[in-house]
Amino acid sequence: MPATSVIGAQWGDEGKGKIIDLIADRADVVVRFQGGANAGHTVIVDGQKSVFHLLPSGVLHPGKLNVIGNGVVVDPTVLLEEIDQFESRGLELRNRLLLSGAAHCVMPYHRTLDALKEGEKAGVKIGTTGRGIGPAYADKANRCGVRLWDLVDEERLRVRLAANVADVNRLITALYDAPPLDADALYETARAQGRRLAPMVTDTGRTLRGLLAEGKHLFFEGAQGVLLDLDHGTYPFVTSSNADSLGIAAGTGVPPTAVGHQIGVAKAYCTRVGAGPFPSELHDEVGERLRAGGGEFGATTGRPRRCGWFDVPAARYAAQLCGFSGLAITKLDVLSGMEEIGLVVGYDVDGLGRVDEYPVDTPLVERARPVIETYPGWSEDIRDVRSYDDLPSTCRSFVDEICRRVGVPWELLSVGPARESTIIRSVA
Ligand code: IMP
């Protein structure tokens, strides 16, 4: 069976959690391949809300194996808190959670560096989640990171930490006038965390390739979204990993051909949290209405999300980049009651004129003013609708228009926050 992936088709927060949870139900193994505790997937099951930052969503499904791949940056403090939280709810986890030894750790000094960099008066403010993600990936690329294999080896950990903390202290005291960090205290905490995590740390790439060969259904769960991708998003206003399907092979150690079915998740409108260009952003009461109706506040930081209309060229760019086989369109119910609904179909880019394709280069995206077409809305509450044919005709037309313009058919439509408020056409 080909593996499946679910990827955010916008700027993150597309409502992936629910879609991921539904697909996790049909998979044998759920794998995270990038990002870290900057993610926040909210899932509502039996009226109970769960927010995950690091754990794959398969943890909610008894009997599923969950894997954190080498492309993830793991904050051991957050991971252990989540494990404890789950186990305290009576859910068994330790025997079905594997961690790649090659995954890098987010150490406390990464958070310190993230905060200091964002707090600089000069320089670009990204509006990060403050979870130390950028500095952890920077150490990975700079070949001085602490991997989980180092965390569980006390001698390696001691040597690595001593060198890193000495470097960090030189930097933060000289550049930011911040107090130095205590390497011994960091080592003691990290060593204790390593001892707890050690039984779960392994070569998950080998495990996953073996499971693929056995015909198991692997499911790769994306965090953030294509337009926050380090290489293909609105750089520098991006996260520090490949938050699209291109990150799967590198972030897990499976061949790129493994994933046959890619689902792009797009909200029926757009949101963005943090700084950076957002051509379809609405600065008026319509944007306010979307924020309030959609509960658009960050799951990780609680920050209000910027809101705007669905951006067709941006979603088409995401679809073409990732090769989406289908779309999951979420939060359609949030649009109920709006007289008119906008769809961004192109842009007027200062200096370039009218363009129909997403302009990619960040200054051009910044200069892009949206060309908006409006569609009639619907007044009905659609949360209890369970088939496409029973949706109001204007809602069906809106969905069809999105799919036609993006060039990808829908597979799932989410019409409410609950797991059952979903219309499913086909899911592998
Ligand atoms: P970082 O990943 O914390 O470094 O933040 C970089 C950018 O990505 C900021 O604009 C964040 O708001 C954004 N970001 C990171 N994680 C998420 C997410 O899960 N959803 C939405 N935006 C995110």
Image (cartoon, helix red, strand yellow):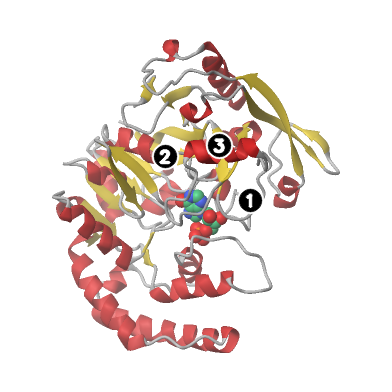
Badge 3: how crowded within 10 Å, few (<14), some, or many (20+)?
many
To which residue does mark 1 refer?
Answer: 234
Is 172 displayed left or right of 412 in the figure? right
- Measured from the top left, where is residue 127 in percent x and y? 57, 60
Q: Quadrant of residue 47?
A: top left
Of the image marks 3 and 1, the number of the one nearer the N terminus: 1
Residue located 54% across and 84% down the image: 171
Q: Pick whichever, 192 or 413, lies toward us.
A: 413
Closer to us: 200 or 172: 172
Count up the numbered dots. 3
Report, in whole angstroms, how far the alpha carbon at label 3 lies from the one at label 1. Answer: 23 Å
Residue 290 numbered tag: 3
Q: Which residue is drawn at 23% across and 38% down?
A: 28
Residue 303 drawn at (x, y percent): 51, 54
Which disc, if any, is residue 16? 2
Q: Which mark is residue 21?
A: none
Crowd around label 1: few <14 · some 14–19 · many ≥20 (10 Å) = many
Front position in the image: 16 or 138: 16
Q: Identify the element where label 3 is drawn.
A: helix
